[in-house]
């Protein structure tokens, strides 16, 4: 998410004659990435409707990458704005709160239209609440534990978790291997995790010592190779590791609270 710095659309940024201040074209790149992410999410829905679910999932992954880049690029270019922050939040809702769960519904839940649609609504509404909670009080999501933790599962992680049944099925078979009832229960559980107060790790302020940089880079190379070569198995493994990380974050946060309580 992007911070709140002077908006180029703000009248205060205009010159004395009332004309808008000139804006370097390069500073529009973060918003362009956000718009491309929205296009990727909407196109994922189109491919899902056409039955091309693997391509649809890959487009959501593209949206995840663009979401990770746009905020960092905005900070790098010092082009953060209120417009960019709001656009980023709307993109997150479309790409992570609507597209993935609609894909799940089209893929496996249409025969259970009532309960399946309730699961879709539960997930989308939970994502909207999660994003709204972040927007109105984002400091509370990361202030505990010196910015080590978020509160609740973030929207991009929620999207990857809710698509776990698709990852598993694509890794083992061409068809859904889980019963629709299990997929519905899984979707609702992920929705609850998003709006929960469960602490989850934030990597925004994670630092790496110089001596470990080479290992980090090797890990990135290996992870990229695995994702490109065994994409579905890698995504299944990612989700399982993230679920374990939820427990570790809860335990770490509990220990952190106890230590500060004893001080």
Image (tube, rainbow, N blue to C red):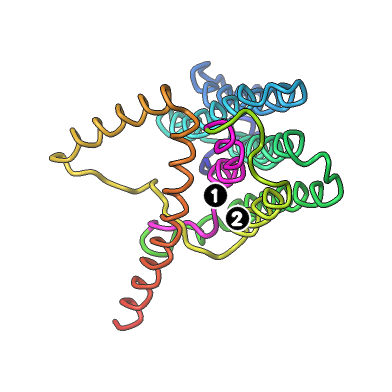
In this picture, which residue range is highlighted in magenta? Answer: 147-171
The numbered dot on residue 94 is none
The answer to whether residue 232 is left or right of residue 218 is: right
Instruction: Farthest residue to the left: give it.
Output: 211
Task: Residue at 55% x, 24% y: name it.
Answer: 33
The crowding category of the residue bearing disc 1, from other C-alpha atoms within 10 Å (few below 14, some 14 to 19, many at least 20), is: many
Image quadrant where residue 110 sits? top right
| Picture quadrant of residue 152 | bottom right
Residue 138: x and y in percent read 54, 55
* Residue on which disc 1 sits: 154
Residue 194's disc number: 2
Q: Residue at 55% of width from left, 41% of height from top?
A: 160
192 or 94, which lies in front? 192
What's the residue at 52%, 21% (across, down)?
29
Residue 122 pos. (x, y %): 74, 53
- Quadrant position of the C terminus in the picture: bottom left
Q: Is residue 107 magenta?
A: no
Q: Is residue 161 magenta?
A: yes
Dominant SS of magenta comes to helix
User: In the picture provided, is 11 more to the left or to the right than 207?
Assistant: right
Q: Where residue 25 sits: x, y (%)?
A: 53, 16
* Residue closer to the observer: 179 or 225: 179
SS category of the residue bearing label 2: helix
Most extreme residue toward the right is 114
Badges 1 and 2: C-beta atoms under 8 Å apart? Answer: yes
Res. 86 image quadrant = top right
Q: Answer with mark 1 or mark 2, whichever residue precedes in sequence.
A: 1
Task: Give the alpha-carbon distance from disc 1 to disc 2, as whole Å.
Answer: 6 Å
SS label for mark 1: loop
């Amino acid at each position: 998410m992007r911070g709140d710095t002077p908006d180029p659309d703000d009248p205060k940024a205009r010159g004395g004659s009332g004309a808008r201040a000139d804006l370097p074209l390069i500073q529009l790149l973060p918003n362009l990435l956000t718009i491309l992410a929205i296009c990727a999410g909407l196109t994922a829905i189109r491919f899902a409707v056409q039955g091309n679910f693997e391509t649809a999932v890959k487009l959501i992954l593209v949206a995840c990458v663009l979401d990770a880049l746009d905020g960092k690029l905005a900070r790098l270019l010092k082009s953060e704005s209120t417009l960019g922050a709001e656009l980023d939040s709307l993109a997150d809702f479309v790409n992570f709160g609507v597209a993935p769960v609609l894909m799940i519904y089209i893929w496996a839940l249409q025969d259970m239209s009532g309960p399946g649609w309730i699961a879709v609504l539960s997930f989308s509404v939970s994502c909207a609440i999660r994003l709204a909670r972040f927007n109105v009080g984002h400091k509370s999501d990361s202030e505990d534990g010196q910015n080590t933790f978020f509160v609740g599962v973030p929207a991009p992680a929620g999207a990857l978790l809710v698509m776990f049944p698709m990852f598993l099925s694509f890794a083992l078979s061409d068809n859904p291997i889980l019963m629709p009832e299990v997929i519905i229960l899984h979707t609702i559980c992920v929705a609850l995790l998003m709006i929960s107060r469960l602490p989850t790790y934030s990597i925004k302020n994670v630092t790496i010592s110089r001596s470990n940089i080479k290992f980090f880079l090797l890990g990135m190379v290996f992870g990229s190779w695995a994702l490109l070569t065994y994409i579905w198995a890698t995504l299944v493994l990612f989700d399982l590791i993230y679920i374990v990380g939820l427990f570790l974050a809860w335990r770490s946060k509990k220990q952190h609270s106890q230590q500060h309580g004893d001080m």
